[in-house]
Amino acid sequence: MPTFSIIIPVYNRPDELKELLDSVAGQICRDFEVIIVEDGSEMKSEQLTFQYKQQFHINYLYQTNQGPGPARNTGAQQAKGRWLIFLDSDCILPNDYLNIISQEVDCEEFDCFGGPDRPHPDFNTIQKAIGYAMSSVLTTGGIRGAKENLDIFYPRSYNLGVRNSVFNSLKGFTNMRFGEDLDFSMRLLKKGYSTRLIKKAFVFHKRRNNFRSFFKQVYNSGIARINLEIRHKGTLKPVHWIPSLFVLGHILIVIGAFFNPWFLLLLMFIPTVLFFHAHHVTKELKTAFWAVPAAFTQTFGYGLGFFEAVISRKLLGKKEFHAFHENFYK
């Protein structure tokens, strides 16, 4: 019986999955199995998984498209490991990733863990810029799970581990399309289980390749924040309103610029700060330049989605929803 069962849901991403499986094959720790769950993909990865059967134990499962939460549940049903590790298919693991986790689970008493993410040096400029936007302290990086001191730590499903027994006691993930990982972590904490941030157990996370798909993702994250508040009362914090206030503030500044050109200086202040901070973090001039529109895409996308959900769910009392049903992956 392996210590770890690595569960990877995949949807039309065989090329990215290959990069992840190559990194799994290079792990120092070999006490694991891998379960691939194909969630109704047209571009299937079954033949790809055959290439790794001589390197480690890998199991391929196919189901009709149900979303990432149910796909992870399908994988967990077949898992034999004491710990379940959920990874997104667009991640790459450092070769000591499992070794670090193995040392932590042997020494510490916790029920669920997570780790941060970062861009790989070989990622393209847009991916690095989006990676900065999703992890920077100047955007929403501090409340996404990279730091423990800003909020309760909620592990995210791109890099999440949980005891098999605990996962089963919670009946796994719900059918939420976005925010399902936060919903899982919140239910876990409500049951009295504990979480732990393992800072050294990071993954390289590709995320989106363009701002259009990135906007759709973060817009749905803003909607999910309100959906989560309705499911879990009291989890919405003042910090979650910052992107929406950022959107409102910029609208007011633009309006003010029609009457007083000095307001244009305010419009330049935040991009300038973002540029120099991104350059300090990434050490790349080109990445720092693209980090500015990436950060604005993230903040505006999240803030606008948040606003729509506040109006739709809080004011009008409508049911749980998400946006871009028909073209999210286009």
Image (spheres, rainbow, N blue to C red):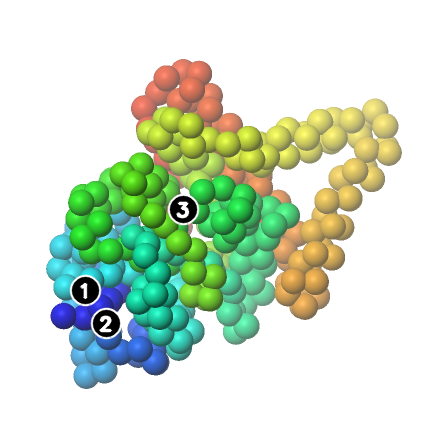
Categorize mark 2 by other alpha carbons within 10 Å: few (<14), some (14-19), many (20+).
Answer: many
> Disc 1 versus disc 3: distance between alpha carbons?
22 Å
> Disc 2 versus disc 1: distance between alpha carbons?
7 Å
Categorize mark 1 by other alpha carbons within 10 Å: few (<14), some (14-19), many (20+).
Answer: many
Determine whether, in the image, residue 12 is placed left or right of residue 222: left
Residue 172: x and y in percent read: 22, 46
Considering the image in quadrants, where does the N terminus appear?
Answer: bottom left
- Badge 3 amino acid: Tyr
Q: Which residue is at a point 59% across and 53% down the rendered structure image? A: 136
- Badge 2 amino acid: Phe
Label number found at residue 154: 3
- Badge 1 amino acid: Gly
Determine whether, in the image, residue 137 is placed left or right of residue 99: right
Label number found at residue 81: 1
- Callouts 2 and 1 close, C-beta under 8 Å: yes
Q: Residue furthest bottom?
A: 54
Q: Secondary structure at mark 3?
A: loop
